[in-house]
């Protein structure tokens, strides 16, 4: 659904909104709509250690303009603060203040990325734990302060250093339009698994794309977010097998025809759904996206078994069953990657959604608990938790509630299905295998569950 307010404040009502101090969301730079002029702007890399220099070299090798000091009057596309060596909160001040001083040089949709050790109370000294946890608070707060479509996110190093392949992919994701609607979030890299993709390879499409030659099953692919995921995975080179209910067969066929994919009409809660999926792929599954989901909202006092059970069956039990079956039957390829749809409702809870929030929190639990078995096969399993996304589902909300929900995020607008799809494409890529068992929010830093 179109956000008319966003169009108006970027058009005829720009001055009025400014004068009245109304929210002024900007059109986000997404993949394919990021101006060349933006991409040519330099990236400022702050930090004094060897890691910061290594990172600056990586950016240079990948064709980016890099600065190690802000230069008066020069506009920047991004600021990267490398804080991997921080041992105490008192050491943070020089770098964070330099970030602050450079913020006004960022162009619209500019990026701040912090890179630091993952907080680990078990192995870090109290001082170091205070510093690493402190950096997460800094990044989240800065994300709330960003203006004009800018975002702030962090990369957390959990037992790895900056040379881990997934650090590069996480950086390409966070610097690019693929993460337009991700802000105030962290990508934890916990192993050296995965391929070290160049920025060009990460941003390529089709036969050169990061998913080229791999099969990708997407459930609920007939419409909404699922259709956007299917289109994106195909854009990035995957052969897509779209799954949806028989009654959505026509819509599914139309999406699959558009992208040269294969349609599979089935109810994922059927006992033989995993066999049918594997049969349709015709080879071990490389990528599986559990997207199909339903809502059957009711306050708990009015909840009946049909509403509760159907939501649990589709949104979580089917995922558990399909994963277990494919794993037991050896039908996951080596290096298989699974990405599931959670929701911010599963993080924050939501009135009238006890069933839905149970299922979506369940997805987060299932993902974390399955990480080890996927990494043993060289793969990964992660989840994406969307916030307010402009879909048929959110178009049905009362107009005022919808307007409020949109403006509640730091980016002051709803996300697009493609924003969720970009996060999924990234987490399904070989460059992201070092990120495992995590849930990434795609919510524009919505207040809900913040
Ligand atoms: P949607 O209702 O537009 O599409 C869901 C698709 O799943 C439909 O094509 C439907 O036919 C299919 N499906 C439902 N039950 C199925 C079953 N048993 N077997 C096979 N296919 C089945 O939903 P939307 O908005 O695109 O959401 C996609 C996913 O994203 C869901 O898991 C949803 O919970 C999640 N999500 C959506 C948000 C939003 O703002 N739209 C926010 C947070 C999470």
Image (cartoon, rainbow, N blue to C red):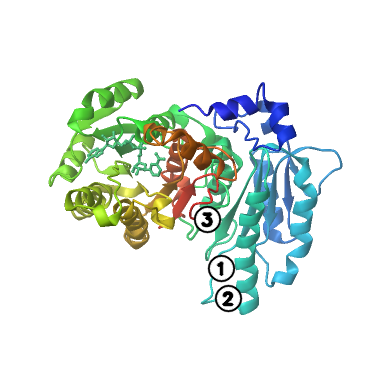
Q: In this view, does 55 lie to the left or right of 286?
A: right
Q: Where, by quadrant of the figure, is residue 49 drawn?
A: bottom right
Q: How far apart are marks 2 and 1 (CA)?
A: 8 Å
The numbered disc on residue 124 is 2
How many marks overall? 3
Q: Is residue 209 above or below residue 293?
A: above
Q: What percent of the width, then of the height, locates residue 204?
A: 51, 31
Q: Where, by quadrant of the figure, is residue 4 drawn?
A: top right
- Residue at image position (30%, 30%) is 222
Q: What percent of the width, then of the height, locates residue 107?
A: 72, 36
Q: Which residue lies furthest to the left in this view?
A: 271
Q: How far apart are marks 2 and 3 (CA)?
A: 26 Å
Q: Where, by quadrant of the figure, is residue 8 drawn?
A: top right
Question: Between 13 and 77, which is closer to the camera in this rendering?
Answer: 13
- Residue at image position (14%, 44%) is 270
Q: Tag 1, which secondary structure?
A: loop
Q: What percent of the width, then of the height, locates residue 114?
A: 64, 55
Q: Is residue 419 left or right of residue 373?
A: right
Q: Quarter of the image containing the N terminus?
A: top left
Specify whether residue 318 is in view.
yes
Q: Name the residue under label 1.
A: 119
Count residues near mark 2 (Cα–Cα under 10 Å), then give few for <14, some for 14-19, many for 20+: some
Q: Tag 3, which secondary structure?
A: loop
Question: Between 217 and 160, which is closer to the camera in this rendering?
Answer: 217
The reply to whether the residue tagged 2 has its Cβ within 8 angstroms of ligand 1 is no
Question: Between 412 and 254, which is closer to the camera in this rendering?
Answer: 412
Q: Mark 3 points at which residue?
A: 450
Q: Tag 2, which secondary structure?
A: loop
């Amino acid at each position: 659904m179109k956000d008319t307010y966003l169009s108006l404040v970027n058009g005829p009502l720009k001055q009025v909104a400014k004068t009245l101090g109304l929210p002024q969301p900007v059109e986000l730079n997404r993949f394919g709509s990021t101006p060349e002029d933006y991409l040519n702007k330099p990236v400022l890399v702050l930090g004094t250690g060897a890691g910061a220099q290594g990172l600056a070299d990586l950016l240079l090798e990948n064709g980016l303009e890099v600065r190690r000091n802000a230069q008066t009057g020069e506009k920047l596309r991004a600021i990267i603060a490398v804080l991997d060596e921080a041992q105490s909160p008192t050491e943070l001040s020089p770098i964070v203040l330099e970030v602050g001083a450079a913020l006004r040089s960022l162009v619209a949709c500019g990026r701040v990325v912090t890179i630091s050790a993952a907080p680990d109370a078990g192995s870090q000294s109290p001082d170091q734990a205070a510093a690493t946890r402190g950096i997460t608070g800094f990044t989240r707060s800065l994300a709330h302060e960003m203006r004009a479509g800018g975002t702030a996110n962090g990369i957390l190093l959990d037992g790895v250093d900056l040379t881990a392949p997934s650090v590069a992919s996480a950086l390409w994701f966070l610097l690019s339009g693929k993460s337009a609607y991700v802000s105030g979030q962290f990508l934890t890299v916990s192993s050296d698994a995965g391929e070290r993709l160049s920025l060009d390879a990460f941003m390529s499409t089709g036969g050169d794309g990061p998913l080229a030659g791999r099969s990708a099953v997407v459930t609920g692919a007939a419409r909404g977010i699922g259709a956007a995921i299917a289109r994106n995975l195909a854009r990035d080179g995957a052969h897509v097998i779209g799954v949806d209910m028989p009654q959505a067969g026509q819509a599914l066929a139309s999406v699959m025809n558009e992208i040269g994919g294969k349609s599979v009409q089935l109810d994922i809660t059927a006992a033989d759904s995993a066999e049918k999926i594997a049969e349709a792929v015709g080879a071990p599954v490389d990528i599986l996206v559990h997207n199909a989901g339903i809502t059957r909202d009711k306050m708990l006092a009015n909840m009946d078994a049909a509403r509760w059970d159907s939501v649990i069956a589709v949104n979580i039990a089917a995922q558990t069953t399909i994963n277990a079956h494919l794993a037991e039957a050896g039908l996951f390829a080596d290096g298989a990657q699974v990405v599931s749809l959670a929701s911010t409702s599963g993080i924050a809870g939501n009135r009238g959604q006890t069933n839905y929030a149970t299922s979506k929190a369940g997805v987060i639990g299932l993902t974390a608990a399955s990480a080890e078995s996927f990494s043993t096969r060289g793969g990964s399993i992660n989840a994406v938790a969307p916030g307010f996304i402009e879909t048929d589902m959110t178009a049905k909300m009362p107009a005022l509630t919808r307007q409020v929900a949109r403006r509640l995020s730091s980016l002051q607008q709803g996300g697009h299905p493609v924003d969720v799809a970009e996060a999924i494409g990234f987490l399904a890529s070989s460059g992201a295998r070092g990120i495992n068992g995590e849930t990434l929010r795609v919510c524009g830093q919505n207040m809900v569950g913040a």
